[in-house]
């Protein structure tokens, strides 16, 4: 979201941008990369009155679906404020982020059903500079809180008084000079968004909640784990980060080497996709999740998948299914997919 051409500076969120700035041996095409946002499940204040009987989570590149079954363990109805927090968008870094939708409010196309019926949501969105809420100022200036899609802001077209006020209030930050010597600016606010609703859990009864959304998928047109790249000393620290975050095993690398070969060039056109999912919020309910199931759909049987399963056990068969009983999540999911797309 930095300025555009020197003559028409603007800030916007492109679909793909730079994510690896590691070494000259990393292919030039890596500037097509985009980073993923960590998105997850429902959140609310910890309670001892409602248990999560089951959670069925399916993660695919184009869609995440979750089906929960909750039980009220008391003899009276319980009403809770349930929130689905969308990830914070730091506009000073937004050009590195893959946003799945051009909707400036519900930018992951999030929907919910309760016992099979669509449920309306209240979406709260605020713009923050530090601890200061600047939403009212942006609305006063008739500027969008999240300038994506057709709502992008062209800084050069703003009245000088507006630009000056935005700079003075810390909403626009200096971002270098253009080729013709003009000052360029980058946004300096953070967008905080939550989908909120009141949920009634009937006494001594169960409620089924389903939600789905489009995930933010990180992408790179190559993979740093190819033999021709990962053996570079300049990339060793990044390779070790990958191995730790995605629990990459030697068998995974051996299969990758078989497919990619040892050439420096990416002759097989292998690419990466990365998905993050906030799982730890499942620990807010009374007790563990009685029955948990995770299904990962990489979009093709020829794609390699690596992630840290923790206590999850792989099911028998060819599908990527993992289950656990009395599951208390203590870590979030980070999933790496490598293949042709």
Image (cartoon, rainbow, N blue to C red):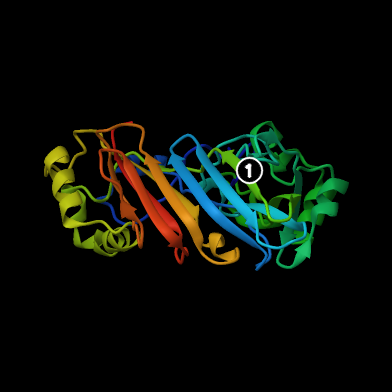
Figure label count: 1
Q: From this viewpoint, is residue 171 visible? A: no
Helix, strand or loop at mark 1: loop
Q: Disc 1 designates what residue?
A: 11
* Front in this rendered view, residue 70 or 318: 70
Reply above or below: 75 against 295: below
The one of 215 and 265 positioned closer to us in this rendering: 215
Residue at the extreme right: 140
Give the residue displayed 20% in from the left and 50% down from the top. 252
Tell me, yes or no, if residue 117 can be seen here.
Answer: yes
Task: Please say if 189 is above or below 146.
Answer: below
Q: Quadrant of residue 151?
A: top right
Front position in the image: 114 or 246: 114
Q: Residue at x 77, y 65 (%)?
A: 132
Front position in the image: 140 or 63: 63
What residue is at 56 percent from the left and 53 percent from the top?
93
The x and y percentages for residue 118 are 70, 34
CA neighbours of label 1 inside 10 A, class few (<14), some (14 to 19), many (20+): many
Query: Can you give x and y, in whole percent of width and height, for residue 216 in the image?
Result: 51, 43
Horizontal relation, residue 27 to residue 147: left or right: left
Residue under the point 74% across and 61% down: 75
Is 46 displayed left or right of 325 in the figure? right
Q: Quadrant of the C terminus?
A: top left
Residue 159 sits above or below residue 52 on the image: above
Residue 153 lies, in percent from the top left, at: 70, 40
Task: Classify residue 88 by image quadrant.
Answer: bottom right
- Looking at the rendered image, the quarter that the N terminus falls into is top right
- What x and y, as percent, mark residue 304? 26, 42
């Amino acid at each position: 979201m930095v300025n555009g051409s020197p003559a028409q500076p603007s800030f916007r969120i492109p679909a793909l941008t730079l994510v690896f700035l590691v070494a000259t041996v990393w292919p030039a095409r890596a500037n097509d990369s985009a980073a993923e946002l960590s998105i997850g499940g429902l959140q609310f204040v910890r309670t001892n009155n409602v248990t999560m009987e089951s959670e069925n989570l399916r993660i695919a590149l184009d869609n995440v679906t979750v089906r929960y079954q909750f039980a009220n363990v008391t003899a009276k109805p319980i009403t809770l404020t349930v929130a689905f927090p969308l990830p914070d968008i730091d506009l000073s870094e937004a050009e590195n982020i893959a946003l799945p939708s051009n909707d400036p409010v519900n930018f992951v196309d999030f929907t919910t059903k309760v016992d099979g019926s669509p449920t309306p949501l209240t979406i709260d969105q605020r713009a923050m500079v530090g601890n200061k809420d600047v939403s009212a100022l942006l609305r006063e200036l008739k500027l969008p809180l999240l300038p994506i899609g057709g709502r992008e802001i062209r800084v050069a077209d703003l009245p000088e008084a507006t630009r000056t006020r935005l700079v003075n209030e810390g909403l626009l930050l200096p971002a270098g000079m253009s080729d013709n010597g003009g000052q360029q600016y980058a946004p300096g606010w953070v967008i905080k968004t939550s989908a909120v609703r009141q949920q009634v859990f009937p006494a001594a009864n169960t409620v089924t909640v389903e939600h789905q959304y489009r995930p933010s998928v990180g992408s790179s047109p190559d993979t740093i784990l190819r033999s021709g790249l990962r053996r570079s000393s300049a990339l060793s620290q990044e390779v070790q980060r990958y191995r730790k975050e995605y629990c990459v095993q030697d068998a995974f690398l051996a299969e990758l080497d078989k497919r990619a070969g040892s050439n420096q060039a990416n002759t097989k056109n292998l690419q990466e996709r990365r998905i993050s999912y906030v799982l730890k919020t499942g620990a807010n309910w009374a007790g563990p999740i009685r029955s948990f199931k995770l299904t990962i759909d990489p979009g093709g049987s020829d794609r390699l998948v690596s992630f840290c399963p923790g206590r999850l056990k792989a099911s028998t068969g060819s599908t990527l299914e993992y289950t656990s009983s009395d599951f208390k999540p203590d870590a979030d999911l980070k999933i790496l997919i490598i293949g042709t797309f």
